[in-house]
Amino acid sequence: MKEKPIWKRNLSVLSIAVFIAGIAFSEIMPFLSLYINTLGNFSHQQLSFWSGIVYSGTFIVSAIVSPWWGKLADKKGRKPMILRAGIGMSLVIASMGLVQNVWQLLLLRMLQGVFAGFISNSNALVANETPKINSGQALGTIASATTAGTLLGPLVGGALTSIFSYRITFMITGGLLLICSILVLFFVHEDDFKPVTTKKLDKASGVIKSLRSPHLIFGLLLTTLIIQAANNSINPIVSLYVRQLLNDHGNVVFISGVIAALPGIATFLVASRFGALGDKIGTHKIIVAGFIAASIFFFLTAFVQNTVELGILRFLVGFSDACLFPQVQTMLTKNSPAAVTGRIFSWNQSAMYIRNIVGPLLGSFVSGMFNYSMVFIVTTIIVLINLLLFRINVIQNLAKK
């Protein structure tokens, strides 16, 4: 029997690992504010403040340190960086179950940001080890596995918290990340890695000079930032929009949970298929189709009259999401030299972390100034601007290559 190629074995193992990691990262989010509330006597305003700063603390630190870890990944390899992130975060998250006050929790959440990079380095390893012709399908598979884990996480977290407690759930989450690290340690092999030894690639300017089309790469990074900021401007207000549509009747929490999960389910179902299609017809064409579809779905969402219509449109948004972020990663892979893949993916990760800060602030500001429907209209405008920038920064530079 013919042995499975190493890149396929790596893809299988890392898909399982990022699935488990996705569960671990998302299972603590639903009860984080409730956990903070147990750490002191807080007013409503104080609880909102601490919830916001504890949540964003991880992403602010990650956005700062990701490029440095990317530089190290290009020198030492992606596998050591995956292990560094997995083991580091397993210890930090488990320790969150032992904190006695909110300051300790904030410190650990910021430390979690220092050790971030498990999924981004898994993406970079798959991108580097997979033949370019299969990279779209491979990265689509990783995206599907991550999405599936992220979807399942809140359900697992809710069940664990009900059976045990907040503190025990943090410790179980740390254990899950340790399992991921063990899987990577024994079953992932990085055979095609060539360490960067050139001094000129130590600095960002050297990396930029090594790119065939810097404008194209930075256009893709900007695309990532705007896509994710647009999505995150909506996520915080979905449950409030559901409550408005239900007129405060019915099970708002349950229906909000279902509607919030629908985009991820759709993305999970089709991301790898869109990736394979992009490998055949051109990944940039899939991205353009995603922008057009997303703008239509977001615009229509502003005018829904009930939660069924909202649910259908949110599910359709999942299909447009599958055309966007996983495919942008594929284009980054196809247009970056192997020597700097880790650095490019770390910059992409920083763009994602920035969106975790900018997106919710934008959504909150617009909904506060106007109403929930206006958030979807503003998001539509942002997506159309992103499409225009993508044509200028990416497609025109593709034509010049």
Image: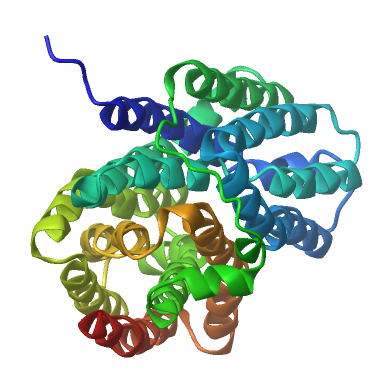
Percent x, y for residue 177?
58, 27
Quadrant in which the C terminus is drawn: bottom left
Is residue 137 depicted above or below 247 in this figure?
Answer: above
Residue 189 visible in image = yes
Q: Quadrant of residue 179?
A: top right
Which residue corresponds to the image point at 65% horizontal and 25% vertical from the top-left?
174
Quadrant in which the N terminus is drawn: top left
Which residue corresponds to the image point at 40% horizontal and 71% vertical from the top-left?
227
Is residue 182 depicted above or below 94 in this figure?
Answer: above
How many badges with numbers are in the image? 0
125 left or right, relative to 87:
left
Coloring applied to the structure: rainbow
Residue farthest along the front direction in this orientation: 198
Which residue corresponds to the image point at 19% horizontal and 74% vertical from the top-left?
293
46 left or right, relative to 65:
right
Name the foreground residue: 106 vs 218.
218
Percent x, y for residue 236?
52, 64
Residue 304 visible in image = no
Q: Quadrant of residue 307?
A: bottom left
Percent x, y for residue 65?
71, 56
Residue farthest along the top direction in this orientation: 1
Percent x, y for residue 166?
69, 29
Which residue corresponds to the image point at 20% horizontal and 16% vertical from the top-left?
3
327 left or right, relative to 207:
left
Is residue 43 depicted above or below 182 in this figure?
Answer: below
Name the foreground residue: 269 vs 36.
269
Name the foreground residue: 339 vs 344.
339
Name the foreground residue: 98 vs 114.
114
